[in-house]
Amino acid sequence: MQEEGLRKQEILKLLEKKLQNDYTYESGSILGSMCTEPLDFGKEIYNKFVSKNLGDPGLFLGTAKLEEELVKEIGELFGCKDIIGTFTTGGSEANLIAMRIAKKLRPDIKNPEVVLPISAHISFDKAADLLDIKVRKARLKPDFSLDLDHYESLINNNTCGVVGVAGTTSLGLIDPIEAIGEFTKNKDIFFHVDAAFGGFILPFLKRLNYNIPSWDFSVESVDSITADPHKMGLGLIPSGGYLVRDASILTKIGFQIPYLAGGNFKHFHIVGTRPGGTIIAFWAIIKSLGIKGFIKIIKKCMDNTGYLVKRISEISGVKLATIPVMNIVGITTENGESICKIDEELRNKNWMLGKFEDFNLIRVVIMPHVEKEHLSHFLNDLELILKKLRIS
Ligand code: 0PR
């Protein structure tokens, strides 16, 4: 650390240089990210409230109340007004909290297990490792949908929780939540839905008349849901959401912290100090956009998705891994050849996609920052690469 502080202009110049190798959303080259540029208004609000700390909610009673209000509003969107919940650092923390609840609610099980689809996010493996839970992964069918028979066969007396995904990481698919719910009916098994990505797109797709199967609290057996503002919610990074149907659960599993300056409160997050600013910003984003504002943004994403889907179907050498249900498109080779070489060549041209080797596909997430012209450039480069590799 240098002795004297630098002037603002000098610091900004230094930063500009040091960060020049970062990819930017507006350049269009980030095609495989589930994050995007937060809404400008959200950034403005966040700047005003960066010091709010919900790790000590007794000091920030207004912020804590606003968090509660926001949860209720999201509950309404997700089919049940009377839920409780909280905001986290992201989907991983929310999923970890869900897995901890599943385990804690069944102290009678010595070797707890959770059943989930093989397409579930890596955060469940992290949670299982941290919590000493065994994960049992259900297979997918060749069309990437969940093999329900296999899923059901993995449920046994050690099962404390089951997971369904509404918006899978690789392809944005929706697991059959109602059918999974049938497996847990009248059983003491916690049912968690990971809608980290899907949460803030599915209710709006429904309003746009897309045929969306039930995935939320309208399915009776669903106990909790992850839905992240910092993905399709256009919220600030980091902000995830964890929503629970039964309010008594959180009081049962929290850690009492009696010495907080604001008084005795229970924590059930992984983190202690917790940003209030991101939550206030998301509250403001929801107020500012309203349902119509979200629909407008999502319609653009879906129009661009449609454009990409059409063009990929016309290009020889590659094909869609499956028909997308939301703004995630999986591209694979027509002849089953490995996708890795194509991904590498695309990276050389600064197209940053997600590569899923297990499914032999590359993933394009058509976030709000992705414009049609970005996709058009990407497709031109893809065609050149396919010619060069003699795949087309
Ligand atoms: N659940 C699902 C279904 C997810 O897709 C993700 C993240 C999570 C949970 C975990 O969320 P957090 O990352 O907020 O903890 N999915 C993205 C992915 O793995 C995360 C991501 C975001 C990756 C931006 C790259 C990136 O540039 O694809």
Image (cartoon, helix red, strand yellow):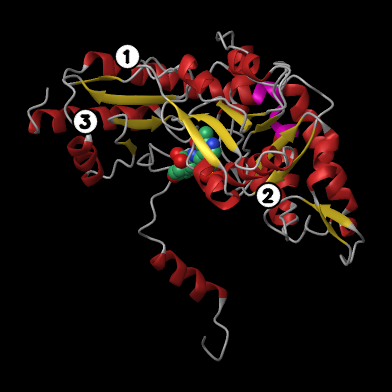
Dot 1 corresponds to which residue? Answer: 310
Front residue of this view, candidates 218 and 381: 218
Please, what secondary structure does the residue beneath circle 2 have?
Answer: helix
Q: Amino acid at mark 1?
A: Lys
Dot 2 corresponds to which residue? Answer: 44
Farthest residue to the right: give it. Answer: 263
Proximity of marks 2 and 3: CB atoms separated by less than 8 Å:
no
Mark earlier in primary sequence (3, 1)? 1
Residue 7: percent from left, percent from top: 56, 79
Q: Is residue 223 above or below residue 85?
A: above
For disc 3, does the CB lie below 8 Å from ligand 1?
Answer: no
Q: CA distance from mark 2 to mark 3?
A: 38 Å
Q: Check if residue 377 falls in the magenta segment.
A: no
Residue 285: percent from left, percent from top: 69, 37
Q: Is residue 279 left or right of residue 333?
A: right
Mark earlier in primary sequence (2, 3)? 2
Residue 64: percent from left, percent from top: 84, 48
Image quadrant occupied by the C terminus? top left
Please, what secondary structure does the residue beneath circle 1 have?
Answer: helix
Q: 10 Å neighbourhood of mark 1: few (<14), some, or many (≥20)?
A: few
From which residue to which does the magenta span run? 286-293
Q: Nearer the viewer, mark 2 or mark 3?
A: 3
Q: Amino acid at mark 3?
A: Leu
Q: Is residue 148 left or right of residue 372?
A: right
For disc 1, does the CB lie below 8 Å from ligand 1?
Answer: no
Residue 100: percent from left, percent from top: 67, 44
Dot 3 corresponds to which residue? Answer: 382
Please, what secondary structure does the residue beneath circle 3 have?
Answer: helix
Residue 44 can be seen, yes or no: yes
